[in-house]
Amino acid sequence: MVQGIGNCLGALDGTHIKIRVPTVDKPRYRTQKGDIATNMLGVCTPHMHFLYVLPSWEGFVADGWVLRDAISRRHGLKVPHSKVQD
C-alpha cells in the first residue's frame, strides 16, 4: 500500500534501460529512438524510497499500459482510494 504525506502519495515514472538480447529478439525491444531496451516503472515515496519496481516491458510501450499492468497484477502496485481534502 502506498503511504502518503499530506496529499502526496509519492511519484512514479518510467525509464528505458539498455539491454543486450539475441538478434532474433531485438525488434521486440527496440525503442522509438532505435535503442534496444526494457521499459521500467518505478514508484517511490516523497522521501525517495522505492515502493515498487516493474522492469519487464519490452522496448516502446505506452506508459498507461505499464501502469495498468502494475495495478492489475496479483501482488502489484496498490494505490489507496481516499477522498481528497480541500
Image: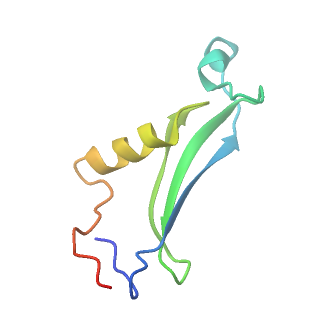
User: Picture coordinates of residue 32 (x, y %)?
Assistant: 71, 28
Q: Judge left or right: residue 28 versus residue 53.
A: right
Task: Name the residue at the front extreme.
Answer: 86
User: Picture coordinates of residue 5 (x, y %)?
Assistant: 40, 87
Q: Nearer the viewer, residue 32 or 49?
A: 32
Tell me the residue at 66%/43% (across/down): 16
Q: Judge left or right: residue 65 versus residue 71.
A: right
User: Picture coordinates of residue 82 (x, y %)?
Assistant: 22, 73
Identify whether 85 is placed above or below 65.
Answer: below
Snapshot quadrant of residue 24:
top right
Q: Judge left or right: residue 42 versus residue 78.
A: right
Tell me the residue at 67%/44% (across/down): 17
Colour setup of the view:
rainbow
Identify whether 77 is placed above or below 30.
Answer: below
**How many badges with numbers are in the image?**
0
Task: Name the residue at the top extreme.
Answer: 24
Identify whether 78 is placed above or below 86.
Answer: above
Tell me the residue at 59%/20% (across/down): 28
Identify whether 85 is placed above or below 37.
Answer: below
For the N terminus, the image quarter is bottom left
Snapshot quadrant of residue 25:
top right
For the C terminus, the image quarter is bottom left
